[in-house]
Image (spheres, grey):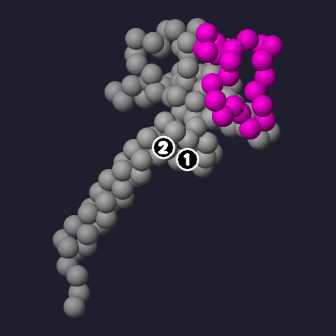
Amino acid sequence: MAIKRKDKSTLFLLGFLGIIIGYMFVSNYFRNQTKTNYQYNIATVEKVISLGKSGWRTEFTYNLNENKTSGRYNIIRDSVKYYNSQIGKRFLVKMSDKPWVNRIFFTYELYINKPVPDSIEAPIEGWKELPDWARE
């Protein structure tokens, strides 16, 4: 029995929506997991990008296990000017302790209120807890 063209379109649409909804549920799960399974590192703000009507984001780089990696963090429009003034500066970033989760679900939290002095270097694997110097 052949499937009609309309039925194929409906199946495709349902499959696509299923993937989107699944991604949203899994993303939410990992964002909640990051509240208990996380690490800290030093991020260098690289640029601020407009996403059109979707808002703004800042992109940053950090070193983890001797690999330079990039991340991104969504920001509000009112903060764009401030973030632009912070390009090239270093800040603390909290992320999932699973690098693949960060790449797929962007579980980063950039602490723009925690600047990192040039004299401080992160351990190769980052910090498992908030560093003492950042608790102030």
Q: Is residue 60 above or below residue 1?
A: above
Magenta-drawn stretch contains 61: no
User: Which corner quadrant of the image does residue 92 belong to?
Assistant: top right
Q: CA distance from mark 1 to mark 2?
A: 10 Å
Residue count near mark 1 (Cα–Cα under 10 Å), binned few <14, some 14–19, many ≥20:
some
Q: Is residue 71 above or below residue 104?
A: above
> Is any atom of residue 88 visible in this view?
no
> Is any atom of residue 120 visible in this view?
yes
Q: Are marks 1 and 2 in contact (CB under 8 Å)?
A: yes
By secondary structure, the bulk of the magenta-drawn segment is best described as loop
Q: Secondary structure at mark 1?
A: helix
The magenta stretch spans which residues?
A: 114-136
Residue denoted by label 1: 101
Q: Secondary structure at mark 2?
A: helix
- Residue drawn at x 62%, y 35% as measured from the top left: 39
Q: Looking at the image, which is closer to me, 123 or 64?
A: 123
Q: Is residue 25 above or below residue 47?
A: below
Residue denoted by label 2: 33
The dot on residue 113 is: none
Q: Looking at the image, which is closer to me, 104 or 40?
A: 40
Q: Position of residue 99 (x, y in %)?
A: 63, 45
- Residue drawn at x 31%, y 64% as measured from the top left: 15
Say what amino acid the circle numbered 1 marks.
Val
Q: Position of residue 87 (x, y in %)?
A: 63, 15
Magenta-drawn stretch contains 134: yes
